[in-house]
Image: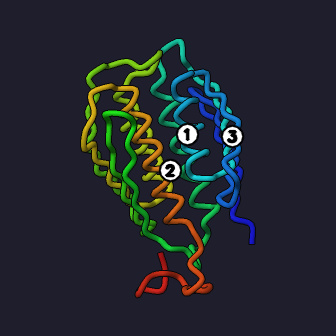
């Protein structure tokens, strides 16, 4: 069964397209017009072993907010579609990733319920041309549209670049674990309710 999705969304502020294959090899093709965001999305695909293509055109003459948030919306929708009924998946995933002095932990439940718990701080307000506040907005949009619970905790770190990179890599590795097939589950839905 192919666990892939392609979704496009166009508004007066942005035009976003995402292709996602959960069973890929980490091949990415990212172009959002925001260099540091491209770098983070590339890390997400590479460390999750997802084939991920993202094309985004947005009102960057205003700022990056709409582009980053809307990319999270579309990526979340693609994730939900690719997972379908979530039959046979592990459902839960967690990872702690160091990046030099930074250490970030991410835990995921593909529960069908949207929740983001965010405990990350950045000592710099801007990375490249990207407002560091937008990382939380991206993950809020991702969880809200992917319908999953995500807890992200910064355990150490002072370099904003290192912290951001550890966040995306930790989430990628936790998500890779959560979407993985569990052969003991077979095609069952991993919930006592019978649905997620």
Label 3 to label 1: alpha-carbon separation: 9 Å
Residue 28: image tag: 3
| Residue that numbered label 2 is attached to | 172
Q: Residue 167's image quarter? A: top left
Residue ranking furthest to the right = 1
51 left or right, relative to 12: right
Q: Quadrant of the N terminus?
A: bottom right
Taking the spot 32% from the left edge, 42% from the top edge, the residue there is: 103
In this rendering, the answer to whether 63 lies above or below 140 is: above
Q: Residue 8's image quarter? A: top right
Label 1 neighbour load within 10 Å: few <14, some 14-19, many 20+ = many
In this rendering, the answer to whether 121 lies above or below 85 is: above
Taking the spot 44% from the left edge, 35% from the top edge, the residue there is: 165
Relative depth, front residue between 160 and 108: 160
| Residue that numbered label 1 is attached to | 43
Label 2 to label 1: alpha-carbon separation: 8 Å
> Counting residues from the N terminus, which is met first, the one under dot 3 or under dot 1?
3
Percent coordinates x, y for residue 80 in the rendering: 57, 60
Label 2 neighbour load within 10 Å: few <14, some 14-19, many 20+ = many
Residue 158: image tag: none
Taking the spot 64% from the left edge, 36% from the top edge, the residue there is: 16
Q: Are marks 2 and 1 in contact (CB under 8 Å)?
A: yes
> Counting residues from the N terminus, which is met first, the one under dot 3 or under dot 2?
3
């Amino acid at each position: 069964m192919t666990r892939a999705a392609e979704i496009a969304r166009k508004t007066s502020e942005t035009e976003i397209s995402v292709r996602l294959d959960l069973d890929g090899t980490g091949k990415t093709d990212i172009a959002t017009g925001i260099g540091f965001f491209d770098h983070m999305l590339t890390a997400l695909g590479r460390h999750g072993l997802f084939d991920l293509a993202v094309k985004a055109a947005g009102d960057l003459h205003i700022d990056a907010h709409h582009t980053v948030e809307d990319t999270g919306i579309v990526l979340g929708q693609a994730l939900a579609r690719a997972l379908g009924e979530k039959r046979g998946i592990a459902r839960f995933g967690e990872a702690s990733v160091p990046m030099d002095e930074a250490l970030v932990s991410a835990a995921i439940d593909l529960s069908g319920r949207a929740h983001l718990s965010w405990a990350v701080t950045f000592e710099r307000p801007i990375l490249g041309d990207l407002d560091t506040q937008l990382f939380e907005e991206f993950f809020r949009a991702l969880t809200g549209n992917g319908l999953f619970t995500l807890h992200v905790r910064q355990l150490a770190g002072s370099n904003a670049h290192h912290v951001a990179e550890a966040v995306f890599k930790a989430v990628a590795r936790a998500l890779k674990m959560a979407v993985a097939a569990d052969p003991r589950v077979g095609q069952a839905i991993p919930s006592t309710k019978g649905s997620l």
